[in-house]
Image (tube, rainbow, N blue to C red):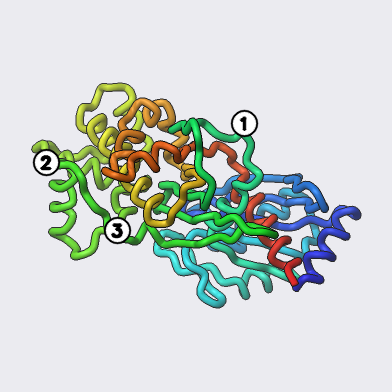
Amino acid sequence: MAEAARQLIEDSASDALLLAADVGGTYARVGLVRIGDKNTEVSHYHTYRCAEYPSLSAVFENFLAQAGRGTVRHGAIACAGYALEDTIINANLPWPVSQREIRRSLSLDDLVLVNDFTAIAYATSYVTERDVTPIAAAAEPLEGPVLVVGPGTGLGAAVRIPGARSPVILSTEAGHSALTASTELEVEVLRRLLRDSSHVPMEQILSGPGLVNLHAAISGLRGTAPLPLTPREIAEAAISGKNPVALESLRTFCGWLGSAVGNLVLLYGAQGGVFLAGGILPQIKDFLLASDFVARFRDKGAMRKVLERVPVNLLEHGQLGVLGAARWYVDQRAAP
């Protein structure tokens, strides 16, 4: 497989490209990436709504046709979920994902699947100050593993561990771990959710659809019927100040997320910092900055002094997952 990566880099001089994608439950971000010895460049890029296509192969076929690229021999797919042999396990995807089927339909010589947050974590090595918004500054940041976490269709998380040659990425399914509560309101919300299930995962609240669940639960606690709103509509209603329940829901969401991210930092020893990703957070950036996210993130008793030295940044690089998939492919395939 090292030969595949070397051939790709050599071919790049003659206009050969890698098909790279970042696929979540809602959107598929696809690009053609030129890999060089010292730089990675996206030459063509497009975002697709997954539900509008019958399969992931159909997305790629449309993309390649629009890009006007007849022959692409290598592919790297960063996909939400857990890669098990040939398939991706994820209940949030609208269709099954099979490495074998995609490779056959696109006539690729080589194709790899990687978890989407593994790719994003890998790409954070290339992030600059222009790509982030500081959420929690740290005067004297510590060194160590870096946590990447983000609420999108689900809740993704990965840890980048520094290595001598290249970083090691710890993929996680933190979004499926049990949700914990710290305030009276959170306890009441969790109690309502436990009526229907013995296990409430973090992403049932801390995700885009989770915000809808949270809004419904708080509406019930306040004795009102929840309006049929999307996550974006709840956020907009909260930010406008015209809907008190939406405002309380978004405030609770931000604080609960801060507490959960602080827990993950302590769990994984991610003292090198946190990158927040995911589709919903850039939409509520100003609200998040004014919320009690940071206060809840640091409210960990004796560990507060440690968390005060952990910087938190919001990622705003739309192509980061695509670039991460491409760099991961080359570095992994080039490894002896």
- In the rendered structure, which amino acid carries the disc numbered 2? Leu
Q: Extreme top residue here?
A: 241
Asked if residue 191 is positioned above or below residue 186 in the image, the reply reads below
Residue 230 rendering spot, x and y as whole percentages? 34, 40
Label 1 SS: helix
Residue 162 rendering spot, x and y as whole percentages? 59, 55
Q: Extreme bottom residue here?
A: 85
Q: Is residue 261 left or right of residue 14?
A: left
Label 2 SS: helix
> Picture quarter containing residue 317?
top right
> Picture quarter containing residue 295?
top left
Find the distance from the CA under tag 3 to the CA under tag 2: 20 Å
Q: Residue at x 20, y 32 (%)?
A: 245
Between marks 2 and 1 in the image, the one whose residue lies nearer the viewer: 1
Asked if residue 239 is positioned above or below residue 253 in the image, the reply reads above
Q: Is residue 318 left or right of residue 243?
A: right
Residue 130: mark in rendering: 1
